[in-house]
Image (spheres, rainbow, N blue to C red):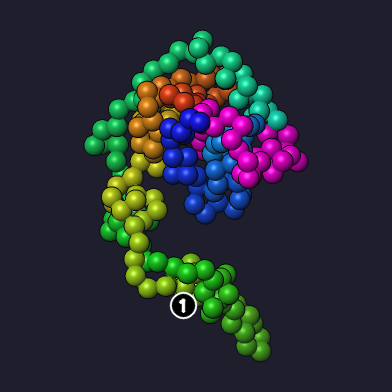
Amino acid sequence: MTESLINLSKYTSKNDARVFANKVINISGYLGVCNGHILIIDETTKDKHYGFLDFHSERKQQVQDYKLEDQLNSIRENLDSFVWDDMPPINDEHYRDCHDCNDRGLVPIREDGCSECKGSGEVELENDHNSYEIECKGCNGDGNAFAGGFEPCNKCAGTKKHLSYVPVLTVNTKWALSGEYVQSLGRLPNVKLSWQEQYEFFAFKFTGGFGIIMPMRT
Ligand SMILES: [Zn+2]
Ligand SMILES: [Zn+2]
């Protein structure tokens, strides 16, 4: 049995409303991650998807997914004919200061559901004439109460700098590649990148798998 080469779970989303986006899932018989921004297929896991959420049954209502499956098959069949490049380099100028943590690298740990506002982030005030809503002071409008203590910021992983929506490779007047994916996927073994004009996404491949990166607007 081949050991999977990559740790897929580090590519899942953390708090996406779509359950499958936060999990390693079965995509057409392979384990993978599909979070709306990137899709990764680990080809070393063929038919080892028992017990994992099935992406296609999860989203079978949506025509979009059948298109996705066609695109995946088309990519798999044509991997050898694509023109592949190295991932673009990231320079110091690409990094942006992180505002999610006010450049501290840490954010307060929160627990689910502030009791004061029942998780809505707002409290309703009423008198005989009016009712109005104000930001909840218990959670500063976040909806979740402070649990005490701090944890590394999700956006910058505690580094105080991030590459989220920072264009590092512009492919035409409309589309570019965001630096966060260069950072997160750039260490995959022998990773290569290929812009696919007909699909308007980036394909990437690495030893043991391949995937898609959605571009950002320029
Ligand atoms: Zn609250
Ligand atoms: Zn941060």
Q: Residue furthest left?
A: 92
Q: Does the Cβ of the disc 1 residue fall within 8 Å of ligand 1?
A: yes
Residue 108 visible here = yes
Residue beneath the point at 59% across and 78% down = 124
* Amino acid type for the residue under numbered disc 1: Gly
As for residue 136 lying within the magenta part, the answer is no
Question: Camera-side residue: 45 or 172?
Answer: 45
Question: How many residues crowd around disc 1 within 10 Å: few (fewer than 14), some, or many (20 or more)?
Answer: some
Q: Where residue 64 sits: x, y (%)?
A: 69, 34
Q: As displayed, is residue 162 above or below residue 42?
A: below
Residue 215 visible here = no
As for residue 46 lying within the magenta part, the answer is yes
Tally the marks: 1
Q: Which residues are magenta?
A: 36-65
Q: Residue furthest front?
A: 1
Residue beneath the point at 41% across and 22% down = 192
Q: As displayed, is residue 48 above or below residue 51?
A: above
In this rendering, position of residue 16 left or right of residue 218: right
Residue beneath the point at 31% across and 53% down = 158
Q: As displayed, is residue 53 above or below residue 105?
A: above
Q: Residue furthest top?
A: 81
Q: As displayed, is residue 21 above or below residue 43?
A: below
Residue beneath the point at 61% across and 44% down = 52
Specify the quadrant of the image occupied by residue 199. top right
Q: Residue furthest bottom?
A: 128
Q: Secondary structure at mark 1?
A: loop
* Residue under numbered circle 1: 138
Q: Where residue 23 sits: x, y (%)?
A: 55, 47
Q: Where residue 40 sits: x, y (%)?
A: 51, 33
Quadrant where the C terminus sits is top left
Q: Where residue 140 sits: x, y (%)?
A: 45, 71
